[in-house]
């Protein structure tokens, strides 16, 4: 379950004063973590894993809005 530790570290990391390339890397890292947790969730159906994925997805969306701009 070290993927959950990585997710927790990512979730608690500060996202201010990031360059564009840092935002791209952070978005890709979030996607990697979400997909890895999803594979575990498919087998266990643990509600806590779903909550972690929701929080990571929210953070990923904030990063991507900053990258792409608001519609």
Image (cartoon, rainbow, N blue to C red):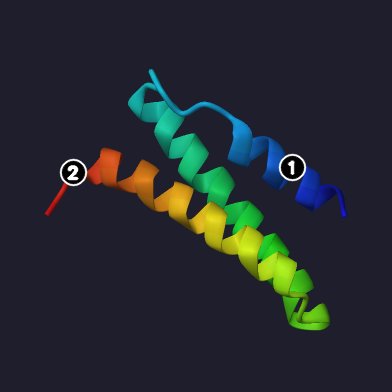
Q: Quadrant of the C terminus?
A: bottom left
Question: Which label sits on residue 30?
Answer: none
Q: Which residue is drawn at 70% across and 43% down?
A: 8
Asked if residue 55 is positioned above or below residue 10 in the image, the reply reads below
SS of the residue under disc 2? loop
Horizontally, is 31 left or right of 69 in the view? right
Seen in the picture, residue 20 relative to 57 is either above or below; the reply is: above
Residue at x-position 55% and y-position 49%:
30
Q: Is residue 57 above or below residue 5?
A: below
In the image as oriented, which residue stretches furthest toward the top? 17
User: Which is more N-terminal, label 2 or label 1?
Assistant: 1
Place of residue 63 in the rendered image (x, y in percent of width and height, measured from the top left)? 38, 42
Q: Nearer the viewer, residue 70 or 29?
A: 70
Q: Distance between the residues labelled 1 and 2?
A: 28 Å
Question: Circles 1 and 2: CB distance less than 8 Å?
Answer: no
Percent coordinates x, y for residue 21 in the rendering: 40, 28
Q: Position of residue 17 (x, y in %)?
A: 38, 18
Q: How crowded is mark 2: few (under 14 residues within 10 Å), some or many (20 or more)?
A: few
Q: Is mark 1 on a helix, strand or loop?
A: helix
> Residue 33 versus residue 16: which sits nearer the camera?
16
Residue 19 in picture, x, y percent from top left? 37, 22
Q: Does residue 67 appear left or right of residue 29 in this picture? A: left
- Residue extending farthest to the left is 71
Taking the spot 71% from the left edge, 74% from the top edge, the residue there is 47
Residue indicated by mark 2: 69
- Label 1, on which residue? 6
Quadrant housing residue 32:
bottom right
Q: Neighbour class for label 1 at 10 Å: few (<14), some, many (≥20)?
A: few
Residue at position x 28%, y 40% from top?
A: 67
């Amino acid at each position: 379950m070290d993927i959950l530790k990585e997710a927790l570290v990512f979730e608690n990391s500060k996202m201010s004063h990031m360059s564009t390339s840092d935002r791209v890397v952070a978005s890709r890292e979030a996607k990697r973590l979400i997909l890895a947790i999803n594979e575990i969730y498919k087998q266990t159906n643990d509600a806590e894993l779903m909550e972690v994925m929701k929080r990571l997805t929210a953070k990923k969306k904030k990063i991507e809005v900053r990258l792409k701009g608001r519609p």
